[in-house]
Image (spheres, rainbow, N blue to C red):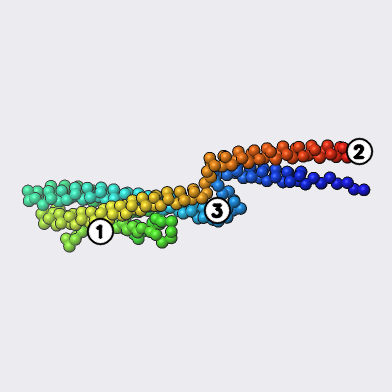
Amino acid sequence: MAFRLNDVSFNHALLYLKNSQKSLSESLDRMSSGKSITKAADDAAGLSIATSLESQVRGLGQSMRNATDAIAIAQVAEGVLGNSAEIIMSIRDKALQAANDSQTYQTRQSLQSDINKSLAELSDISGNASYNGQKLLSGEFSNKSFQVDASSGETVEMIIGNASPAVFGNAYGNLADINVLSSEGAQQALSVTDSALAGINSMRSELGSTQNQLTVTINNLSLTQVNVASAQSQIADVDFAEESINFSRIKSLEKAGTFAVAQIGKMNRQKMSDLLQG
């Protein structure tokens, strides 16, 4: 005849212990990860919202880096244009000197030689100004878009024109071809350099406006990121004080469950022994 000992109390105590151990493990996971939701089973809806908010936070961070890159580009270009303006003013000073009829052909030749060197320097810095391998003042950097929002389509456009000497000028010619070997040529050179300076200043003003726009954008993005991150934290981040209390409570229950299983097991073994001896 078969004999089976089936103790419902022991089974209940064992199940209770396993549940306590599972809860204890989950509490440890939350505290070690810092997240109140560690898997979809914890809170499927909450996890979906938290993941979406985290994606927004990361997107906003990248948008700020994009805007910072754009500001850096504008600053590099504006700095080179500032140097260009200094060179053009130096050329204008020499043209003004050459316009004086006290100058001889030989002294004007010397002034023209200095101007030619300045023009070569101006051409060199405008042609070599670059950021991350991209030419900035050669006319190649036009219609560039910078993604400055986590949403698609939110961009800031930047156009930087050509700043080479051959581009600037007026009806008297362009900056690259000025000639001060005569009083008339020197007078025309003054007009050309004034036009060139106006063009340079216009480019610098446009870049300054773009930098201001980008700075405002970064400030707005930063504020939005803080707010979104706070909302994400409220949903996903664990409250360590509360979780510590919860952990202690579950730990006490787990100890009680372990003790109950041990005691019931001991009593069952005693019952089995008594039955076998009886």
Residue 149 placement (x, y as % from top left): 41, 56
Q: Position of residue 190 (x, y in %)?
A: 15, 54
Specify the quadrant of the image occupied by residue 262: top right
Task: Look at label 2 and name its amino acid.
Answer: Gly
Q: Secondary structure at mark 3?
A: helix
- Cα gap from disc 1 to disc 2, whole angstroms: 115 Å
Q: Amino acid at mark 1?
A: Val
Q: Are marks 3 and 1 in contact (CB under 8 Å)?
A: no
Front residue of 119/36: it is 36
Q: Earlier in the sequence, mark 1 or mark 2?
A: 1
The residue that label 2 is drawn on is 278
- Please indicate, yes or no, whether residue 131 appears anywhere in the rendered image: no
> Which residue is denoted by mark 3 in the rendering?
47
- Residue plotted at (39% across, 52% down): 221
Quadrant (top left/top right/bottom left/bottom right) for the C terminus: top right
Sequence-wise first label, 3 or 2: 3
Residue, disc 1: 167
